[in-house]
Amino acid sequence: MDRTRRDAEFREAFPLLHVRAYQAAFRLLGDQAAAEDVAQETLTRAYVHWIRLDERREGWVVTTAVNIVLDGFRRDKRWRRFHSDTAATLTTTVDAEDDEQTQRLDLQRLLAALPRRQRQVAVLRYLEDRPVREVADLLGCSTGTVKRHAARAAATLRTALGIDPATDPATEGA
Amino acid sequence: MFRHLDDPTPPQPTDLVVDRIVAEGARRVLRRRVMAGSTAAVLLALGVAGIAGALPGIQEDDNPVMNPGPDEVPRSSTTSSSSTTTTEPSTTTSTTGSGGTGPTTPGPDEGGDVFAAAIQKPNADVVQIVLANTTTNEVDRVLTEFPMIDRGGGCCVSFSDDRRYVYYVVEAGTFEEQTDMIWRVPTNGRDPEKLLAGTRPVVSPDGRTLLFLASGATGADLVVHDLAGGDERRLTPVADDVITSYGFTESGEIAFSRAAGGEISKLYQLNPGATVLTDARSIGPPAGSDNTTSWEISDVRARDNKLAVVQQTGGIGDQTEASLLYVDPTTGATVETLRLLGRDADVANGISGLQLSLIGPSDSPGPSTLYVVKGMEWIEVDIGTVLAVDW
C-alpha cells in the first residue's frame, strides 16, 4: 500500500477510531487531556500498523488505548501513589462523581492484573459493551474463546462494579 | 455497563492534529523499515556463523496483530533443561531448530491419555462436559451438557486424580449478578450434582479439597473447601491485590499468582492449612521478568513436583508471545522453558507426564483447537471447539 492510499484511508477512518480510543482511555482516566494524549498515541500506532489492521482496526484501537493507559499505570509508581491517595480521599467524601473516579481506579487495577487475552476480551465485552459475536470478530477468534475468557475476567472485574458481596447471589452458600 | 464513565463531550481533533499524527506515523514507519533492515542484516550474519538458532523469535512487529493467517498454530521454539544450584531463578534457553514440528497424528506409543474437557456442542450454544483421549482423537463420552450463556460458558474443568469426578462451572446470571455454580459429574454415568456458588474450581490431588474463587469483601476470595466435611476457609486478598491463577502442588500445597495493586502477577506458595494469604512464600518471578511480563499458572500438579507457569508478555504493544516455564517450588529455579512464538496460546490446566495441553491459538480465526505438546512436538486433538481441559 502506497503512502497516499494509506493516508487517505487513515484520514477517512480517523474520526471514528479517535473517538473509540479517546472514550476507552477516558473511561479509565476521567481526564480529558490525558485521554486525548492516549488517543493520539494510539492513532499514531494505528497509522504505523495500518496495513495489517483491516476490518478489525476498531478493536485494535480500543485495546491498544487501554494497554497504553495500563502501561502508564504499571510503570509510573508515583502516578499510582497519587491516584491511591486520591482514592483514599474520595472514600471520605462520597458523591456520584467520586464514585466514578473510584470505579475508574478499580478498573485500571483490575484490568492491569488480567492476563493479556482476558484483558482484551474484557475491554471489548464489558468496557465497550459489545456483543460476544462482535468481540469475536474484532479479535479474530471464536465466540467460544471469547466466552471462556469473558467468564474468567468477569469474576475479577465484578468488584469494580461495587457489588455488595452480602447481596451477591454468587456468594450464597459459598 | 461502563458507558456512564464516558466523556459526554469528547473533543473533536482539528485537521492540524490529524496532520501531526499522520506525519509522526509516517516517521515511525520509516524508522521501522530502517531497523528491520538492520535486524535482517544481523540475523544473516548470525546465521552464517551458525548460531541463529540460538536466538528467540525476533519479529518486526511489536504490536498486536489482529489478523494472523488462518493456518497459524502454536509453535514450540525453544526448550531446555538447565538445572541450577542457585536460589535465584534462572533460565537457559537453547533451540533445536527452526521451530516446532507437527501436527502429527497421535499414535498408541505416544502416551495417549484420557482427559476431561468442556467443549462447545457443534452448531449449538451448548456446553458439553466430556471425556476424550489423545489416542483415539475422539470424544469418548459426553458426561453432561448445559446452555452456554452470552456472558460465558464452559470456562473451567478440573479432573480428579482418581478419575471419579469432573468438576466444572455452570455460568448463569448477568455480569452484574453472576450466579455461577460449581458442579461435579461422576465419570461412571451417574447424575451431576450441584456443589457451591463460585467459579474456577481446582480439586486437590487427594480429591478431598476444592479450591475456587468466590466474591468477597475486597474482591474475589480464594476459598479452600473440604469436600468431605463441608468446612471452608476464605483466603481474602488484601486490598488492591488480585489472585490471577492457582492450583495444587503434588504435595498438596497451594500455589497461586497474585497481582498486587496493578503490578504484574507474582508466584507464591502456601501451606494448605494457612488461614491468611499473607503467609504465602514468594517463589518467582524467573529471570528476565520485568514489568512488561505477567504470569499465569496453568497447573501445578506435575508429577515431578514442578510448577508449570505460563508467562505472557504484556505492556505497550502486547507482542503476542507466551512462554511455558517449569519452576522448582523449592528454589524458584526455572528448569525448562518452551516458547510459543508469535501468537499466544492459552495453556490449559493440564499436564500429564511430558504432555502439556494448549487451547488456541486464540488469535486465529475459527474454533479453539486443543493441542497437546509432547517434548518438542505438538499434536492437534480434533474434538471440536475446546473451552477448557484438564488431565
Image (cartoon, coloured by chain):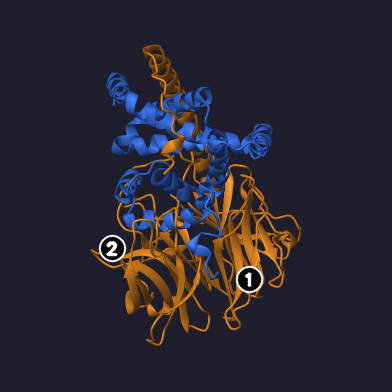
Chain colours: A blue, B orange
Q: Is residue B102 visible?
A: yes
Residue shown at 40%/29% (left/top)?
A46
- Please name whichever residue, B291 or B289, is drawn nearer the observer in this view of the structure: B291
- Please name whichever residue, A62 or A162, is drawn nearer the observer in this view of the structure: A162
Query: Outermost residue, top direction?
Result: B16
Instruction: Indicate the amino acid at tag 1.
Output: Thr
x, y (%) of residue A4? Answer: 29, 18
> Callout 1: few (<14), some (14-19), or many (20+) C-alpha neighbours within 10 Å?
many
Residue B55 vertical position relative to residue B353 in the rendered view, above or below = above
- Please name whichever residue, B358 or B162, is drawn nearer the observer in this view of the structure: B162
Q: What label does residue B249 carry, if any?
A: 1
Question: From the viewer's perspective, is A134 left or right of B181?
Answer: left
> Callout 2: few (<14), some (14-19), or many (20+) C-alpha neighbours within 10 Å?
some
Question: From the viewer's perspective, is B119 left or right of B248?
Answer: left
x, y (%) of residue B255? Answer: 64, 65
Residue shown at 41%/58% (left/top)?
A148
Residue B95 vertical position relative to residue B105 in the rendered view, above or below = above
Residue B202 vertical position relative to residue B98 in the rendered view, above or below = below
Number of the front mark, 1 or 2: 2
Q: CA distance from mark 1 to mark 2?
A: 35 Å
Q: What label does residue B148 carry, if any?
A: none
- Please name whichever residue, B54 or A55, is drawn nearer the observer in this view of the structure: A55
Q: Is residue B60 visible?
A: no
Q: Which residue does the numbered mark 2 point to in the structure image? A: B125
In the rendered structure, which disc, 1 or 2, sits on the residue that comes first in sequence?
2
